Amino acid sequence: MKKMNSQVWALVIFSLVFAVVYKFSLWYAASLGNVSSFVFSFEKDIPFIPWTIIPYLSSGAFFCIVFLQIRSREALRLFLKRVVAMTLLAGIFFIFLPLQYSYAKPEVKNPVFGALFWLLEGFDDRYNQSPSLHVAFAFAFWTVFRELKNKWRTVAAIWLVMVALSTLTTFQHHLIDIFTGSILAHFVFVLFPSQNRQVGFRNLHVANCYFLIGWATVFTAFLLAEFYAFYWIHLCWLGVAIFVLGYLYQTNRVGYLRLAQIKIRTSNNR
């Protein structure tokens, strides 16, 4: 019962912080009257897919699930710190560097999807764009759901990817919001690392540093390709290499790589 109370209180605290920060940011951006947008030239080719409103809206339901999924108080405090920090940092950007979505949504003919979009418009607006909290929170959810086993872990991973991509296909966010949301998530992971008692703590912390650098590298590649010369997009390959290195640390495979290198050097010395 005490554990359940802690989970509920953590959810209440987050909900209050999110409601205040998000709504104040929306009100402030709307009061400015002239808020700019940032759109990559190729984004006009991103399709509008009405059914993806379902994974988009599911982000709210995930919070109720994920808080109840966390078992230890230490992990609960860590998760709460992370999502509150993401909300506060995003709120700072929403206020001091406000952006708005620039494309008009096509008409949604399906009555069910249309009702869901109508529901979304009731509490959201075209502001609070960069960084995307949908994307940042999806990464936060994964830190909990990656502990699941077998098929449920795979299902959670696929659904969270859909949540992130749906920000584009529901015409709620531009691509810059995805990049900055990903950078925000991993910056907070580095700021608030996993518990010291967790297996692979050091490797997980190093992995998040690499993921942060990887997202920053890919974002830089897109910016340089957009404003200078397209060949800068090849910088993404460096980002991919950094992601791979981060993944090896995250899965604790770096030790095996080092052992293989030692064996190779030993055999060469012979």
Image (tube, rainbow, N blue to C red):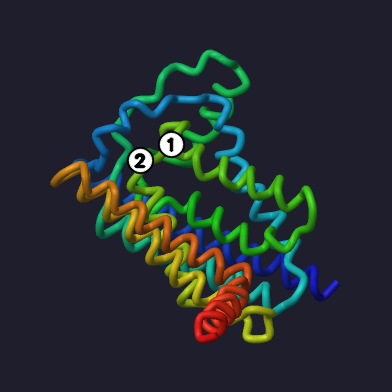
Q: Find residue 144 and name its label.
A: none
Q: Circles 1 and 2: CB distance less than 8 Å? A: yes
Left or right: where 246 falls relative to 43? right
Which residue is denoted by mark 1 in the rendering?
Answer: 168
Which residue lies most toward the left here? 228
At label 1, counting other C-alpha atoms closer than 10 Å, the crowd grade (few under 14, some 14-19, many 20 or more) is many
For the N terminus, give its image quadrant. Answer: bottom right
Quarter of the image for residue 47 reads: top left
Residue name at image x 64 percent, y 78 percent? 200
Secondary structure at numbered mark 1: helix
Q: Is residue 194 visible to the viewer in this orientation of the structure?
A: no
- Residue at 51% across / 45% down in the picture? 164
> Could you tell whether 36 is left or right of 166 in the image?
left
Q: Residue at x 58, y 16 (%)?
A: 110
- Mark 2 — residue? 174
Question: What is the number of callouts on the image?
Answer: 2
Q: Position of residue 59 (x, y in %)?
A: 59, 47
* Residue 92 percent across, percent down from the top left: 33, 63
